[in-house]
Amino acid sequence: MPKGYWIARIDVHNPEGYKEYVAQNGAVFAKYGGRFLVRGGQHVPKEGSSRARNVVIEFKDYETAIACYNSPEYVRLVGLRSPHAESHLVIIEGYDGPQPRA
């Protein structure tokens, strides 16, 4: 079964206010088995628009990724985050098919 992923692009407008979201989100992600693959870090925008912060979180499957986002615990965290940051987030199913060959 393919994994599920959150891909988020974020501009934080109030770093002090955003800290509470960061302090509390780990417990929610751990409950749903979420694992950070990308959490900030350097990036080079090559095509289209960019945001200051990029995050990719991996879940065991697509359904779990959706369940985490819709959980009461995370809905509450969106309320904490929203006044302090502008975000774009997509939940996507991973790919387990054939890969390109050299």
Image (cartoon, rainbow, N blue to C red):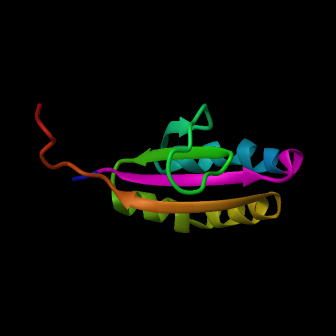
Provide residue 56's location: percent of width, then percent of height.
50, 45
Q: Could you say which is closer to the camera, residue 63 or residue 4?
A: 4
User: Residue 84 sits in which quadrant?
Assistant: bottom right
Tell me the magenta residue range: 3-17
Majority secondary structure in the magenta region = strand
Looking at the image, residue 85 lies above or below residue 55: below
Residue in the image at 44% along x and 58% along y: 65
Looking at the image, residue 36 lies above or below residue 73: above
Q: Residue furthest front?
A: 47
Provide residue 8's location: percent of width, then percent of height.
56, 54
Q: Reply yes or no: does residue 9 show up in magenta.
A: yes
The image shows a total of numbered marks equal to 0
Specify whether 1 is left or right of 61.
left
Provide residue 89's location: percent of width, then percent of height.
55, 61
Provide residue 57's location: percent of width, then percent of height.
49, 46
Specify whether 87 is left or right of 13.
left
Q: Could you say which is closer to the camera, residue 8 or residue 34?
A: 8
User: Residue 93 sits in which quadrant?
Assistant: bottom left
Specify whether 64 is left or right of 75.
left
Residue in the image at 11% along x and 31% along y: 102
